[in-house]
Image (cartoon, rainbow, N blue to C red):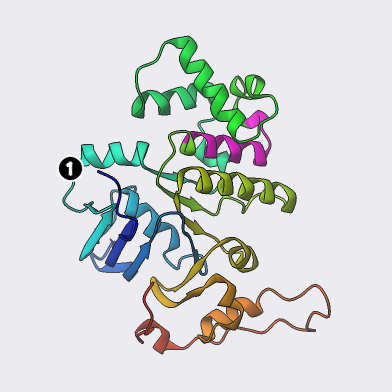
Amino acid sequence: MPADMTQPLCEIDDLRVGFRGHDGELTEAVRGLSLTLHRGERLGIVGESGSGKSLSGRALLGLLPQAAQYHAKAMKFDGQDLLAMSARKRRQLCGQQMGMILQDPKYSLNPVMTVAQQMREAFELHGPKLSRREMREQIIAALGAVHIRNPERVADAYPHELSGGMGQRVMIAMMVSSGPRLLVADEPTSALDALVSMQVLGILDEMIEKHDTGLIFISHDLPLVMSFCDRVVVMYAGRVVETCAARDLVHAQHPYTRGLLAANPPLINPPDELPVLKRDAAWLTQSTGASA
């Protein structure tokens, strides 16, 4: 049955993620997150460290740590209820139709396994059974698809032998080779220089166009999000405080978003002093009046 293009690819309603401290008290790190994502859409999530961006992405894929306690009114992928789904079915979705690019390949790739060994493990877990030769060809093709110039050499290399940009491309190759319909990219360019960042974004662009993939792009880089994404969700202390079109982020109204923008001074005629964000306790409870 063909997919309903009018139906959101992903829906989250009132997601809450918390952790219990040594005193047994539950502290919520994500508090009432609601958002939708459509096919082919790039949704940026921005905010300070600790605002709940990464936890929200991990909750969607079922990758939260064991200590986390979470619940939501609804969490759906392509019309399927993720909350009612069995753990086995959820794992199958995560390997074939949903994927996540983690932040830093230095910590995400196994240092004692070659690139080929790690990619083989991922492909065997979620793909059809292949001969040794067919698997090698699939690995080389996946590395070539992310514009690695010498995929044969990189396949036999260990993570410490790769640059940051090369390691990030390997991570992307592992995630996008199956053509996922939903991809969560958790700060995929944070450890890269400007040129390599643009190359990585170009690879994501190709994947979105080829597979009509919906992308959740988590980042601290507001100018990058404005230029690359379609919509932006701004999170503060686990809550969404503002949602707008990416091109309109520069005109955002919430004082927290204005503070984040002010922390990126222009290169031409920069201010003598950076403004200090003055936080308001009301930001923790007030309604945003906007839907993500």
> Which x, y percent locates residue 237?
42, 73
| Residue 71 in view | no
Which residue is at the far right? Answer: 269
Q: Residue at x 75, y 83 (%)?
A: 273
Q: Residue at x 29, y 52 (%)?
A: 78
Q: For the residue marked with disc 1, what is the amino acid?
A: Ser
Which quadrant does the C terminus fall into? bottom left
Within the image, what quadrant is residue 38 found in?
bottom left
In the image: residue 269, left or right of residue 42: right
| Residue 8 in view | yes
In the image: residue 203, left or right of residue 102: right
> Which x, y percent locates residue 211?
46, 43
Within the image, what quadrant is residue 70 found in?
bottom left
- Front residue of this view, candidates 270 and 232: 232
- Front residue of this view, candidates 270 and 126: 126
Badge 1 marks a residue whose secondary structure is loop
Is 78 placed above or below 242 here?
Answer: above
Is 28 placed above or below 88 here?
Answer: below
Within the image, what quadrant is residue 14 found in?
bottom left
> Which x, y percent locates residue 192?
67, 49
In the image: residue 195, left or right of residue 282: right
Is 201 placed above or below 141 here?
Answer: below
Which quadrant does the N terminus fall into? top left
Q: Residue at x 44, y 57 (%)?
A: 54
Q: Which span is picked out in magenta?
A: 160-174
The residue pinned by badge 1 equals 86
